Amino acid sequence: MATVEVKKPVGPPGQPDIHYTPDLDNYKSRTKRRTTTEKLDPGLPEGFPSRLGSDLVWNGTDIADRYDWVYQLSADEVEEIETALKHFKSLNKPLGFINQETFPLPNLHHALRSISEEIHNTFGFKVLRGLPVATCTREDNIIIYAGVSSHIAPIRGRQDHQLDGKPADVVLNHIKDMSSIVDASKIGAPAYTTEKQVFHTDAGDVIALMCLETAAEGGETTATKPERMIIQYARRTFTGYMGLPRSSNIPSITEAQAEALDALHFLAEKHAVFLDFRQGDVQRHLVRLWLRDPENAWETPAALKQRWDHVYGGVTPETTVFPLEPRIRSSSAGKGSDQSTNGAS
């Protein structure tokens, strides 16, 4: 279909030269300019630790020697998953009722609980490989995804508040290029394009991605250096993206804030590990869940409590929806869409 040309967003008066895609030369120039023209405080903000030391602290150069992040499902474990799928379908319940009881994995459960422990308290990420994606229908794949995930983190978070204009707790989001079928003015996030997403954090405790289709090329994602310190970070709010311009309600950011946004990105890029996602991995058609495991969850900081309550609060099996086909969620819809909002994640 024909698409519209969407110009790069322009910020309010005083907005630094910064866009969604980080520019290394701009970052270096800004840093050099600030260090030579400003008197900068070399200290850390109040409450920031000067050093962190634990298994959660790693970088892309040494993590492979310290940690095997792939859990390969055995034939017996795949069979157990397929048996659990048949059991859930025999109950004739809506997908919102998928949980550890309705999707029983008596043997695999213990390994999945260990994965939750690894995610929360050791290295911070894991790849589960070998789910039978190619032999299952779309709905069966999503049932398996939700069922297996429920043994790692049983609470699913809300990623949208409506579906097709009707109130709903949408807990599943598709990450897929839709730029060839959706007008550019209706796209406000790179999750629905072929453009590589920059480093960011999603809302929620555990971010789960399952790969339904691999990309022709570039089927990688990255995990950044996690620490026992919670950072909620996304630059799209301050730059806008394609059909979703920067909100006029947000004041211009400072040069220091622009430098900080770039610094986070390039530090993450420096220390990242690249994960080669394959079909059936729990990661280009991806589906995403925002999960929470009360047993292992970190304490939610006061500054994030309202956001976390919005994600996890009040989601019930009866109101839960798992869209089977890709759609652009409300907070990522461009201004050309009737459902656009100015959400950040």
Image (cartoon, rainbow, N blue to C red):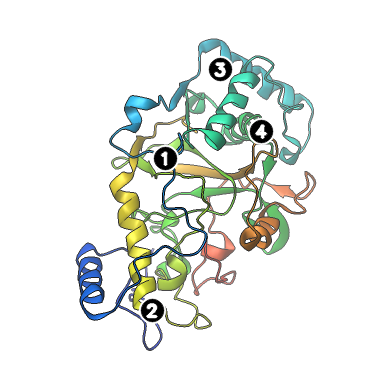
- Badge 3 amino acid: Val
Out of 264 and 135, give the one closest to the viewer: 264
Crowding at label 1, few (<14), some or many (≥20) Cα neighbours within 10 Å? Answer: some
- Indicate the quadrant where residue 97 lies: top right
**Residue occupied by mark 1:** 57
Circle 4: residue type: Ser
Q: Nearer the viewer, mark 3 or mark 2?
A: 2
229 displayed left or right of 60 = right
Which of the marked residues, 4 or 2, is nearer the chain's N terminus? 4
Q: Nearer the viewer, mark 1 or mark 3?
A: 1
For disc 3, the marked residue is: 78
Residue, disc 2: 254
Q: Nearer the viewer, residue 181 or 269?
A: 269
Q: Identify the disc placed on residue 150.
A: 4
Disc nearest the viewer among 1 and 2: 1
First reached walking from the N terminus: tag 3 or tag 2: 3
Can residue 164 be seen here? The reply is no
Q: Secondary structure at mark 1?
A: loop
Measure the C-alpha gap from mark 3 to mark 4: 16 Å
Secondary element type, mark 3: helix
As rendered, which of 340 and 31 lies closer to the eye? 31
CA–CA distance between discs 4 and 2? 42 Å
For the residues labelled 1 and 2, the Cα–Cα distance comes to 30 Å
- Quadrant in which the N terminus is drawn: bottom left
